[in-house]
Amino acid sequence: MSGFRCLKWVSAVALAGLALGWCGRASAERPLVDKLVLDDTIQPVSASMLERAVQQANTDGAAALLVQMDTPGGLLESTRAMAGAMLRSRVPVIVYVGPAGARAGSAGFFLLEAADVAAMAPGTNAGAAHPVLEFGKLDATMNEKVVNDAEAFLRSYVTKRGRNAEAAQAAVQSSHSYTAEEALNEHLIDLVAPSEEQLLAEADGRVITRMDGTKQTLHLANARVVTLRPSLREELLGWLVDPNIALLLLVSGALLIYLEFNTPGTIVPGTLGTVMVLLAIFGLNLLPIRYTAVLLLIAGLALLVLEAKFGGHGALAIGGIVCLTFGTLTLVAAPVPEMGVSPWVAIGLSLGFGVITVFLVRLAVRARRRKARLGADAMVGSTAEAMEDLNPEGHVLVDGEIWLAMASEPVAVGAKLRVVSHEEYLLRVEPEEKVRKAEPVA
């Protein structure tokens, strides 16, 4: 019986080994598809993510790179870099505009057409790819050059993909936009699929033409999809590239640095403020900045300082806040509204920064104008209030402190006084009205 039991155990182990080996071979035979999700504006961080995804797919033996996209558009230079990475990829790239409600606007349309397989989900749209100039308006000739350059860039690979070049150019020339069904009928895309699984199933066995003219058959049946996550660096940069966050960091950091200068030795505000300002500058450096807006910001700050130092009955402060508001609103030359500064952020930052700056600078100016005095010396020139009848001595309240004072004439309790001098710790006071009359008129 013992021999029979041993035989049973050996048989079970062998069968388990065969089963594991079969599962391992089946898993190894499943094609790998790397997946990248782009659901933000097209900017340098997006370009970095896509280039890394293409490199990853080309090194880990993936059968394809799937890019799920939902974007309003973005920067043309970043779009060129991303399209170039897709066109150079050894691994086929599938761009899928999804899920329902997604769009491939402006720059996203260029990326959709650059894919080996272009697909959209029902209820999505793509197009409106007319170039938006980042730095103001150009004359008709220069504008025509920019549009022609964008059209030539699009034609350079649309024709290679066997798609409708005329319909693609219409998206650039007249900002035409297409639904998923219209794009399929116009031969701008290859598939309309409601889900990622159906997309891969329909793409399986499809013969595609690569940029070098070679034919390749896609093998995507029962594919194993691995989603590529953003790196820590890309997450941080994606956060900083939001101009609203960058401006909040810049303003908060500047106020902390100012606080450090006025209270030296605290260290923490200065250190934290410096880090915040540097991060803000780094983030804004990734975006197209209008230098005229920078001049408006500098002018606004100068007006606020002048208001605090010399006083302008509020006129200089209002002018400074207006300059700050227009400067922040126009700071980023955004080709799409999603890349611009929110009006509420611009107004809130300008008002808050303006009020705080005037208040802090005014305090600093007053502190510098006052002589460094201690004790009774510091009381000279201050206003006081009689806490009791002074005839001629009594107690007065000065800046929240109780002092013994002497007046040159009887003073009733509650009278407003001015400290004119002192003898050690005895203050000499005079009625406020008497002192005002004695002051020279400018």
Image (spheres, rainbow, N blue to C red):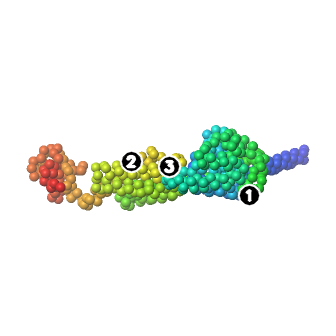
Report whether 363 appears left or right of 6: left
Q: Residues within 10 Å of mark 1 (few under 14, many from 20)?
A: few
Considering only order in the chain, which callout, 1 or 3, is on the residue closer to the N terminus? 1
Work out whether residue 225 or residue 351 is closer to the camera in this orientation and state it.
Answer: 351
Give me the disc on residue 351.
2
The label nearer to you, 2 versus 3, is 3
Considering only order in the chain, which callout, 2 or 1, is on the residue closer to the N terminus? 1
Give me the disc on residue 292.
none
Work out whether residue 3 or residue 202 is closer to the camera in this orientation and state it.
Answer: 202
The residue at the point 35 percent across, 51 percent down is 319
What is the x, y in percent for residue 359?
Answer: 33, 51
The label nearer to you, 1 versus 2, is 1
Which quadrant does the N terminus fall into? top right
The residue at the point 17 percent across, 47 percent down is 416
Give me the disc on residue 212.
1
What is the x, y in percent for residue 290?
Answer: 47, 55
Which kind of residue does numbered mark 2 sit on? Leu
Q: Which residue is mark 3?
A: 340
Report whether 289 appears left or right of 206: left
